[in-house]
Amino acid sequence: MQRNPQLNASGELQHLLSIEGLPREILLQILDTAESFVGVTEREVKKVPLLRGKSVFNLFFEPSTRTRTTFEIAAKRLSADVINLNIAVSSATKGESLLDTVANLSAMQADIFVVRHASSGAPFLIARQVKPHEHVVNAGDGRHAHPTQGLLDLFTIRHYKKSFTGLTVAIVGDILHSRVARSLIHGLTTLGVPEVRVIGPQTLLPAGVEALGVRVFHDMREGLRGADVIVMLRLQNERMRGALLPSAQEFFKHYGLTEDKLSAAHPDAIVMHPGPMNRGVEIDSTVADGPHSVILPQVTFGIAVRMAVMSIVAGN
Amino acid sequence: MKLPEAEQLCEQLARELKPIIGPRSAMIGIHTGGAWLAERLHALLGLSEPLGLMDIAFYRDDYHEQGLHHDPKRTRIPFDVSGRQLLLVDDVLYTGRTVRAAMNELFDYGRPESISLVVLADRGGRQLPICAQHCGARIEVPPGMRLRLTRGADGKLALALEAARAA
């Protein structure tokens, strides 16, 4: 049997490429470690010396502001040196191959590569090529996975709901193009959430999504009934090929989260969104800014989760 | 080999600390054994400032060999350490590396007026220039053994010898 490419010979996390295939113990180790880092981010000196002298290369082959920034802050709070590379405007446009780019950066003594790429599987390709002391963290690859976003969603859910057992989690919107949804679904099922629902129009649900262990709803009110956690996804205009939707207004009417639709959920439900939000498309401003919303805490927790991931992989 | 009674050492330490407690005193225990001892001393001394607890996982000097320790606890220091006379509490003083890490972490919270080290037992074997100002007992530990504090289901503290894990 082939070894899990994310784990080393002792079964410890060497790279973070996807939540799929990670054992429950490792997911919990990351969440528990992140909990300790939340304490660090709340004090006067928000830095620990763990990655002093290490170099973290942020390789973003696709634009991103929030994810890149939070990785950068996380690496700096671990005392690493951070180098940001926007490859979209760099060597790739001059024709250098992905693996040549990585080999060159490796020659510059990189320790961690944080990779965002439009092609699914690119971080796996890099992880296969790097030296034993180098680590790869997937910051989003194509439609495939966005494991640190999934982990910060799991962290946020546990923070507000205290446990995963007994929860109903509803993920709403463009599941088809969403790597966030895929990562989160794997995490939720691994951690024992008994009911995971996906809600969206047929055209935005991947074929065979039920095989991931979720219940499918096309009617939003029905899908939200009694939900403890609602995860709204961004309508991904830039990934949309062909006419999957009549219009953004039409989408909002059926699948936009309004106070009225929210009332079908559990009274203590939390509302999450990975950002960036399209207000008035998938979520109404009154909900995004309302008392159920934990969208901004998600961003803050994202820093602690990324600190946990980088400090765990770099130590293994 | 007969180990001293941890409960008695604890009361003895509290008696020793009583006269030096002042308005700027505050106590911080190091997870896990030091936290148990600190909880006990904090109650015996009736300190007004809440107890601080710290986990030094993010400051250890063996991270590059050992990696990050699993399940680090969250450091919680519920007061401003600046200008305080801190009593830093650990169960067993050995190489001194834990205390060094703890002091580094403390200075990321502020600049205390002073730090005194309080330990239940000193087993020698220092690798750094660190000593305890208040020490319950000096205990010779046979090579390959580890001395640590345990807490029973009834909350009773006891010292125990066990085989050291291959680090």
Image (cartoon, rainbow, N blue to C red):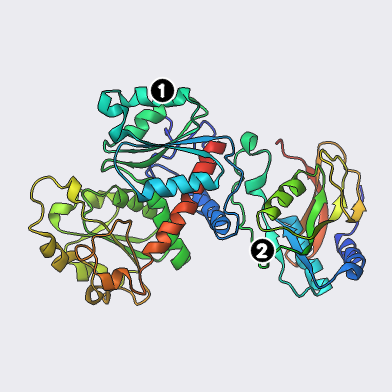
Asked if A95 appears above or below A118 in the picture, the reply is above
Q: Which residue is mark 2?
A: B77
Lateral position of residue A95 relative to residue A309, left or right? left
**Where is residue B166 shown, x and y percent of the image?**
71, 35
Mark 2: which secondary structure?
loop
The residues bearing labels 1 and 2 have C-alpha atoms spaced at a distance of 44 Å
* Dot label at residue A214: none
The answer to which quarter of the image holds residue B80 is bottom right
**Where is residue A239 shown, x and y percent of the image?**
19, 46
**Where is residue B110 shown, x and y percent of the image?**
68, 58
Lateral position of residue A260 relative to residue B23, left or right? left
Does the image show residue B159? Answer: yes
**Where is residue B102 shown, x and y percent of the image?**
72, 51
> For the residue marked with disc 2, what is the amino acid?
Ile
The answer to which quarter of the image holds residue B152 is bottom right
* Dot label at residue A103: 1
Q: Chain of mark 1?
A: A
> For the residue marked with disc 1, what is the amino acid?
Ala
Mark 1: which secondary structure?
helix
Does the image show residue A191? Answer: no
Q: Chain of mark 2?
A: B
Q: Dot 2: within a 10 Å radius of its alpha carbon, few (fewer than 14), some, or many (20 or more) residues? A: some
Viewport quadrant of the C terminus of chain A: top right
Q: Dot 1: within a 10 Å radius of its alpha carbon, few (fewer than 14), some, or many (20 or more) residues? A: some
Residue at image location 59% in from the left, 59% down from the top:
A43
